Amino acid sequence: GVTAKYLSPVPLKFRQWDGYQPPPEFREFPNQWHVEAATQSPQASLGMLTVLVPHRAGQQPKWTAERLESDTAIGVRFVREGKPVIVALRKDGAQGQASVAGLSFDGAVAVK
């Protein structure tokens, strides 16, 4: 299985469905489920992070994910089984050193 958490700065609306529209013409495909996450109102731009945590059936781990944001970066503080990890991404156009939640970095991405 997989658990997903969408870390958006604005409220989202979701749509979930199965199958294909239009259906495949040349061969049969196994049924697939789809999900769509959209903002409730139009946005010029949006920095959204999605955390996907795979697991074996019946063995869903305990975890948390918190959105982090500053003027120069967005990120996530992810904690699984008591082990924290911060992943940060530089915002487009950010100059110089980027930082979020006490983590400073010069590249495009930082992991601590």
Image (cartoon, grey):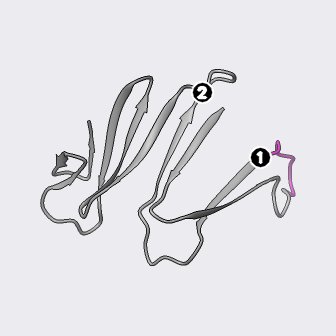
Q: Which residues are magenta?
A: 25-32
Looking at the picture, which amino acid does disc 2 mark?
A: His
Q: Which residue is mark 2?
A: 55
Q: Is residue 29 above or below residue 37?
A: above
- Residue at image position (71%, 52%) is 34
Q: Is label 2 in contact with label 1 (beta carbons under 8 Å)?
A: no
Q: Which mark identifies residue 32?
A: 1
Closer to the camera in the image, 65 or 35: 65
Q: Residues within 10 Å of mark 2 (few under 14, many from 20)?
A: few
Question: Residue at 48% across / 59% down in the picture?
Answer: 8
Q: Position of residue 44 (x, y in %)?
A: 45, 78
Is 43 left or right of 111, judged from the image as shown? right
Residue, x 66% and y 32% (percent of image)? 1
Return the x and y of residue 80 as percentages of the image width and height: 44, 28
- Check disc 1 and give the amino acid type: Gln
Question: 101 and 47: which one is in front?
Answer: 101
Q: Secondary structure at mark 1?
A: loop
Is tag 2's residue or tag 1's residue first in the polypeptide sequence? Answer: 1
| Residue 97 lies in quadrant | bottom left
Q: Which residue occupies the foreground of this view, 29 or 37?
A: 37
Q: Position of residue 89 (x, y in %)?
A: 31, 53
Q: Which mark is residue 96?
A: none
Determine crowd level at label 1: few under 14, some 14-19, many 20+ residues with C-alpha closer than 10 A. few
Q: CA distance from mark 2 to mark 1?
A: 19 Å
